[in-house]
Amino acid sequence: MPDTALFTPHGKHLIAGEWVASTATFASDPAQGPSHAYAIGTPDLVDRACVAAEAAFESYGQTSRADRARFLHAIADEIEARGAQITQIGTQETGLPEARLNGERGRTTGQLRLFAEHILKGDYL
């Protein structure tokens, strides 16, 4: 069962399972709720994220189409299960209104599910 406790923005970047931050920050201008300080994504952090993504691709690239589709469906399920919390955090992080974020969430989960079905069909092969 997913942990539905509300995440408090802390301004760090998650790279390869580790929360990291630069010393330079900026403050959010939320649509609602408190403002938070966020670490600026430096070229070094972007490079670290790219290296981590490339490493993850090596193992993920070896998974079956069914596993990849299950993975995308699981991501969509988790986003939907945590929808209210994600929207609340998103309004604080981005300054976008709740209605816009709810629409973006629906679009995102719809695309994840669409890609999962595309992978299963294998028409791209």
Image (cartoon, grey):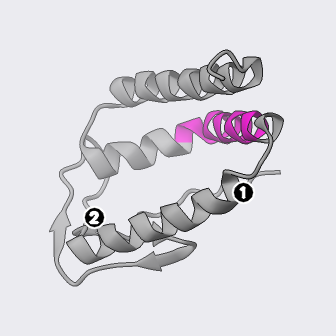
* Image: 20 above or below 100: below
- Label 2 neighbourhood size at 10 Å, few (<14), some (14-19), many (20+)? some
Residue at 76 percent of width and 23 percent of height: 120
- Based on the picture, tell me whether residue 74 belongs to the magenta stretch: yes
How far across and down, in percent of the image, does residue 23 sit?
22, 84
As drawn, the residue found furthest toward the bottom would be: 23
Q: CA distance from mark 2 to mark 1?
A: 22 Å
Q: Position of residue 33 (x, y in %)?
A: 32, 50
Please name the residue that numbered disc 1 is placed on: 3
The residue under the point 64% across, 58% down is 5
Q: Amino acid at mark 1?
A: Asp
Q: How many marks?
A: 2
Q: Is residue 60 above or below residue 8?
A: above
Q: Secondary structure at mark 2?
A: loop
Q: Secondary structure at mark 1?
A: loop
Q: Residues within 10 Å of mark 1 (few under 14, many from 20)?
A: few
- What range is drawn magenta here? 68-84
- Residue closer to the observer: 7 or 74: 74
User: Outermost residue toward the front?
Assistant: 125
The front one of 104 and 92 is 104
Q: Is residue 124 magenta?
A: no
| For residue 96, above or below residue 35 | above
- From the viewer's perspective, tell me whether residue 113 is left or right of residue 16: right
Quarter of the C terminus within the rendering: top right
Which residue is label 2 attached to? 36
Q: Which percent across, then down, holds residue 86?
A: 50, 44
Q: Left of 55 or right of it: where is 118?
A: right
Q: Residue at x 17, y 78 (%)?
A: 24
